[in-house]
Image (cartoon, coloured by chain):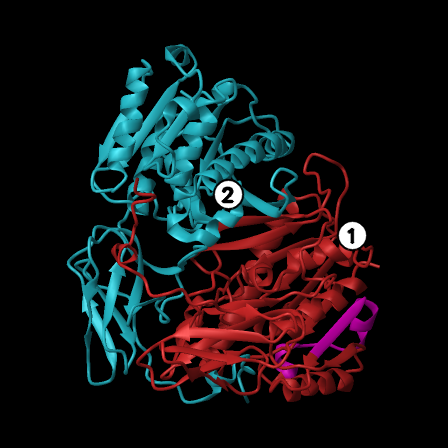
Chain colours: A red, B cyan
Amino acid sequence: MLAFGCAFAALAQTPPPPVVSPEVRPDDRVTFRFRAPNAKEVALSLEGASKDLAMQKDEQGVWSVTTEPLAPDFYGYAFVADGVHLIDPSNPLMKPNLLNTTSQVHVPGPALPWEVGDVPHGEEHHHFYKSAVVGDQRDFYVYTPPGYNARGKQTYPVLYLLHGFSDDASGWTAVGRANVILDNLIAQGKTKPMLVVMPLGYGAPEILRLGFGAFQHTELRDRNFAKFSEALLREVLPRVESAYLVNKDRNSRAIAGLSMGGSESLLTGLNNLDKFAWVGAFSSGGISEEFDKDFPGLDAKANDQLKVLWIACGVDDRLIELNRKVRAWLDSKGIKKVEVETPGMHTWMVWRRNLVTFTGLLFR
Amino acid sequence: MLAFGCAFAALAQTPPPPVVSPEVRPDDRVTFRFRAPNAKEVALSLEGASKDLAMQKDEQGVWSVTTEPLAPDFYGYAFVADGVHLIDPSNPLMKPNLLNTTSQVHVPGPALPWEVGDVPHGEEHHHFYKSAVVGDQRDFYVYTPPGYNARGKQTYPVLYLLHGFSDDASGWTAVGRANVILDNLIAQGKTKPMLVVMPLGYGAPEILRLGFGAFQHTELRDRNFAKFSEALLREVLPRVESAYLVNKDRNSRAIAGLSMGGSESLLTGLNNLDKFAWVGAFSSGGISEEFDKDFPGLDAKANDQLKVLWIACGVDDRLIELNRKVRAWLDSKGIKKVEVETPGMHTWMVWRRNLVTFTGLLFR
């Protein structure tokens, strides 16, 4: 009997022997392998590594490299074959992205906050709607904590959690593992039960067409930020507060995000202190340096309204200087904040840890 | 100002000029392009094509091919570079799969059921739980139709919709576009509002390690089917019926699936007619041909309980003979069914259309 009629004709041909990749070794070194018999140069691009790692080819045409031991975590990676970034065809775990899809490798570490635990799990709700503000069909995700009962009476605070440039609305769960992290921290009593709302972060989605240099186009950048805020406040937030059992006061609303989403959190949060009392910015980027223009009228009166303003960046992130400038400007206005400089580059390893720390402060 | 600190060191290097792929032309021909300057042979593996299409290399090292006009739909595809299947690095739209991730190209066709319409949208809920039956952490998705109100009184029927071998629980939405299809058909009055539950389809997930020949291992195959049914009936179904406003009678429960999931629908549905009145099998595969053993005691008395038994397969699917054998055995038992042979191979283009037709019959 034929087991399955294959959708893809080529699968019916004799395949080459399978390549095992990635292989996580007991000492947490990881071996990556990629078949490319005719490529002249293949390297491994690994999230958090300061340069690509050269790979060596064997007589079967399989390129490989073994890393030093990696700290337990999830790492994005790609193979760079003669200059082209490719995912690992032997690995189903991907890191979805609108500009460059990569693969992910999991180096397990028991009891880390992003490891699926034997604890009650929340749910992740995917919503779809037509945006009048932006004019497109778009989406957002809502994490509901374990025990959330739509037919019950308990109400919850809400964290609005924003992804970075090139991510889509799934970034904070598919890569950031926000739902797993919240499940674990709530079970341990380290974080209050809360809803987490993860909207699509583009006010002008055409900005993606310009790639990673997009934020030098100031008109598009400004429109992207402005329309994002408008869609969040006029469309996503009212839908969430109508559909879910949530507290609707400013002390029960937080906003945080990474990179582009960090800037969006500052712009939306600090300019709408009537709506948000908790603001977190992780490795913010893309914001202009015309802070007086971006935050009109912001001054030390904000200290009465801000429960926490939390600004973090990795010291090896190229955005550390921009973040120090943001903090210096806030200082000049007399605005209190928590300043955090962690190890690390512009990576999800940094942002998962930011989320762990920041959510521990919220709604207390 | 540096726009963003890049997570991946290689992105900071001068990239080669961008490759545009796929390019859908006004006449629905599609051009695929892939940079691989040193590859000796690159071909396009396209869902629904009976053989791979050879690609030609230009002086920049970019391989390309242009298809004949494609009927509007979503098509999976991969580049086969010197024997290795790769996704298209220029295209963020992927077709997730546990054995071979591919890319997807969208050839738009206005008003087709799988095109996002300007209609009310349902939600998609992702649930996570620890399975006592299988012993792992696993997931299922629930589509709720537009207007579903967890705090309201209206109750709905439920379709349990099962993916195929190598898919994960997201297959029917990420590739099958079941949520988009239901949104559209419900808006047009062609399908009754219903919940759609999409569980992980493996009773013995280790079967994936054996790849596409796995179903020749009869012990593992039988355990995979048996434990899937048990997890569905003992774990997923009770959770759904406790958490959602659904009707809990057999006439309000349907089960259907594709390929492995088609066999699971037959095995679970026909052996549990006290629970399901509607059964659909799309391009079923992986089932043994020992039907007397797989369906003990099944006879014409089932006709009183079955509202619809619907068995479909594409005539160019290698599984068409197996499906004809299933039908002949059911005939020998005097069991009534709807027999459908459509154009097509073992592809999602067939299954999207199966879903459109089958859901139109349900709960009437």
Residue A361 location (% of width, % of height): 80, 64
Q: In the image, are marks 1 and 2 on the same chain?
A: no
Residue A258 location (% of width, % of height): 62, 71
Is residue A308 one of those drawn in magenta? yes
Task: Report whether A129 appears left or right of B126.
Answer: left
Q: Please tell me which residue lies in front, B337 or A18.
A: A18
Is residue A104 one of those drawn in magenta? no
Subunit of label 2: B
- Residue B265 falls in image quadrant: top left
Quadrant assignment for the C terminus of chain B: top left
Q: Please tell me which residue lies in front, A228 or A295.
A: A228
Magenta stretch?
Answer: A291-312
The residue at the point 48 percent across, 50 percent down is: A129
The tag on residue B202 is 2
Residue A253 location (% of width, % of height): 72, 58
Q: Which residue is mark 1?
A: A187
Mark 2 lies on a secondary structure that is: loop
**Figure check: A208 above or below A82:** above
The residue at the point 61 percent across, 85 percent down is: A319
Q: Amino acid at mark 1?
A: Ala
Residue A302 location (% of width, % of height): 78, 72
Q: Badge 2: how crowded within 10 Å, few (<14), some, or many (20+)?
A: many
